[in-house]
Image (cartoon, rainbow, N blue to C red):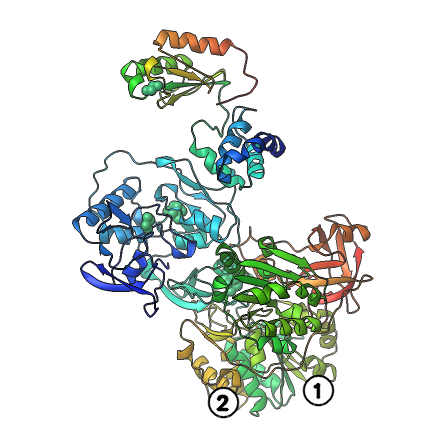
Amino acid sequence: MNADQVRAHIDPIRHEYAEARSLILPALKFAQTEKGHLTREDLEAVGEATGFSAAYVESVASFYDRLYLAPTGARVVSVCVTLSCMLRGADEVWDHLCEREGVSHHGGTSEDGRITIQEAQCLGYCDRAPCIQADAEETKGPFTPGSAAAFVDALRAAPDPHEFWR
Amino acid sequence: MADYAPVDLAADNLVTFELNGRTVSAPAGTMLVDAAYAAGVEIPIFCYEPRLGPPIGACRMCLVEIEGMRGLQTACSTPVTEDMVVRTNSPMAKDAQDGVLEMLLAQHPLDCPVCDKGGECPLQDRTFKFGPGKSRFIEPKRHFPKPIELSSRIALDRERCISCFRCVRFSQDVAQDGQLTMQERGARSEITTFTGDAYEARFSGNITDICPVGALTSIPYRFVARPWDITNTPSVCGSCPVGCNTELTTRDGELKRITGRDTPNVAVEEGWLCDKGRWGYDIAMSPNRLSAPVVREAVGDRTVSIEDGVAAAASLLTGRRVGILLGGAVTLEEAGIALDLATNGTLDNAVVARLGVASGNCAPVRAATGAQLGDIDAADLVVIVGGDPAAQQPIVELRVRKARRFGARVIGCGARPHALESLGDFTRTAPGHLADGMMGLADAISNAARPVVLWDEADLASDPGAIAALTALLAASPHATQLMLGADVNGVGLSALGVSTTGLFEAIAADEVDAVICVHADPLEAAGSIAWQAVFDGFRGPVIAIATYASAMTERADLVLPALTMWEQEGTLVSMTHRAQRLRPGAAGPAQAAAGWELLIAIAHHLGHPPAYRTAASAFTHTVASHPAFFGMTTDLIGTDGVVIGAWPADDVSPAAIVADPDHLVLVATRDTFGDDMTARSHALRTAVSAPVLRMHPATAQALWLNEHDHAVLISDVGSSSALPVLCDARVAEGLIVGPLGAPGSPIEGALSRNQHQAIVRVERT
Ligand code: SF4
Ligand code: SF4
Ligand code: FES
Ligand code: FES
């Protein structure tokens, strides 16, 4: 993505941010929609569009779990592991998904490159615990290990989204 | 380093407060850590570093109890107020110190035995002094592959980092190179650059001084010495005319490290050094270092002992009319001895001259109130007239950036574009037309409360209109102070001793001299090299080179006496801000070499005229006694911080004025501290070297049918340069070419006249 594209996205919302620095986050989220992760060029483009150094932009990006500095799977599946979900069986869901996708118990990307499994903290779906979120688009629950696997299978089969909002 | 800011206990806005049961005072607004330190109470800190700007409270090491405030407060970011009651040693404060240190050490590898910082490490010291002694942390610690190279000069051991942000603030706020950042978060936090690129910046080494742990260390110093087998000597840097105060670390007679001083000189460098001053000393070990005297005879070169070399020098000089040429970095002592020998009958009526820029005609500007670099901090307006300070006087850049950070306005004019122009409003002037640019600055200067005008010695000296304009500007602004951006390392000292840039060349050409001594001076590699070459070609008498490194002159000379470097000898240098400061040796140097002053004294002894002094100190006393600028000065008075010298009668030599006109191209030379021959020979600085180029406006290049990277030579009426690549830079004025002075092989010196930094040239593509 280039700086002009980033500018086109942030210019209309500039006035909503009292501090120029704060624009870096929406700019990064938008830049990420293109490939699903951020490349060196994306970081430079955001730096140019926001007026901060690329190094600073990268340091901001590195702080957040949902901004990816390396390629991910086509879909990112976040499994909530915070209290309500944990009490309602999140661990079993997590372990089952990791095992099925063939990734370590820290999460990771499946071999076919379709799915990235990662832990998430409370997603605000405690009333439907344990819950799962697909990218930043769709949050659902409650899941059993079996229904979670079916949810992931459906994601795997679905066409990639037009933009990667994570 | 300088952890606590100095506190002025004589200020008139003192407030009184209670500190651990005692009543103490400090100026209102002083941070509690500094006020306490001034009162003899050390509150431990890590992230606080007053030179980096306002405190950020990142490490929590400085927690103290303040009556009436809830919880504990960070003393680094709490200003003292009247009647405050502070406890730094109460059970609650002690508990916090234990807790913070235990927390900082939880992820710390405690590998002090293999850590370069061990023995001089604030984390180690403060853990012993304030820490809990035991850790309850038994979990596995974080690990990183170690160390990684942040650059070719700086190693990073990430697991040692305590996330104090000092290095990041230096890079972002002080040097403003924007490169260092903290990435990730929590236990994974690490210092890094954009996508892991090398941290290449001219002031990068300072982060190794301010890192309070062993996370950032100097690669050339890695595993080289331990604090208990080194000695540290305060000295000054002689790589440029700024004269930053340094500390030399010596082990076994060898120089192992240069750092900023623990107690920085706030009037000069404030503890910061450029990477050249910090790491450039390895050229003293480079292959072209001269280590034994050489007698050049028809049958070939003969290496002799230093005693025989001195004796040979004396016999070459006996009965001859002598000329002595001094380089721009020659010390006061060496120049003083040369002048003494010329007048006391040792070398009958010898002609003494120096290489460098003459600026006697700038005396009216100099007569206005002078400023030190430290005064720039408090300026509300910084004016830069001419020059290329970021390249020629590196530390000035940090000072001006600091003033800008504090809200000063930065304005100026000049022919050469430079890095500080991005800080404010600058106008481009053609060479010889600085006065036009200054007209636009007059209002700002007279309206400012504390303006400081930085003016370039070489640019002003060759632009009489500019001298008159600046003199008038300064006279019209009673608050204005001025500071010269000097050309030669000891140019001020040498002119204060009355050493002229003229006389010797003319004497040689007129056959009035039949032996020449060059002291740290190579006229064949200096501006005007072609003319010098011509007079030396016709010169039949002996030439003696007292020099440190092999150069064209040491190849030409009949006798070469190897001299010590500025890191190996005693001496006094006067900085561009007129500050006399002392060099002190931090290394022994080759066995068959000696300091320039020692060699001159030894030669005098051999000539049967033992001088009245034997040491550098007594030569200093003898020298200053006869020169008004130094009256009353003693080495004690200079001490470790230096002292500003007095006024001296200006000589009337000045460089020829070169006034640009539309029909001619003008070459203006810049001596880039990182592009000179010395830097090119340093191994440590190999990735910092700036390549020699001819910078010109794209339109100028186009008019000359030149593309970027084409090679071109400059031809003036005195000679020509070697071929150099063209670099297009739209910031350069049209019709102007900026060329590198002092670059390896002295490429442009041939096109310049003696002691000039500008020339009218033609350009030819090669
Ligand atoms: S590397 Fe050193 S200076 Fe930089 S944050 Fe870590 S401890 Fe502080
Ligand atoms: S700015 Fe000049 S005096 Fe200071 S360290 Fe660098 S070269 Fe040396
Ligand atoms: S704990 Fe999982 S959504 Fe709140
Ligand atoms: S020194 Fe006060 S918080 Fe770090």
- Tell me residue B627's x, y (percent): 53, 86
**Category of crowding for the residue at label 2, using alpha-carbon neighbours closer than 10 angstroms: few (below 14), some (14–19), many (at least 20):** some
Instruction: Look at 42% across and 54% down and name the residue there.
Output: B52
Q: Chain of mark 2?
A: B
Q: Which residue is mark 2?
A: B610
Left or right, B179 with respect to B438, comes to left
Residue B698 appears in the picture as rendered: yes
Image depth: mark 1 or mark 2 in front: 1
Question: Which amino acid lies under the numbered mark 2 shown in the image of this protein?
Answer: Pro
- Kindly state the secondary structure of the residue where label 2 is placed: loop
State the residue in front, A15 or B634: A15
Q: Is residue B539 above or below residue B75?
A: below
- Kindly state the secondary structure of the residue where label 1 is placed: loop
Q: Which mark is residue B512?
A: 1
**Category of crowding for the residue at label 1, using alpha-carbon neighbours closer than 10 angstroms: few (below 14), some (14–19), many (at least 20):** some
- Tell me residue B439's x, y (percent): 68, 65
Question: Which amino acid lies under the numbered mark 1 shown in the image of this protein?
Answer: Glu
Left or right, B59 with respect to A65, comes to left
Q: Chain of mark 1?
A: B
- Total label count? 2
Say whether mark 2 is within 8 Å of ligand 2. no
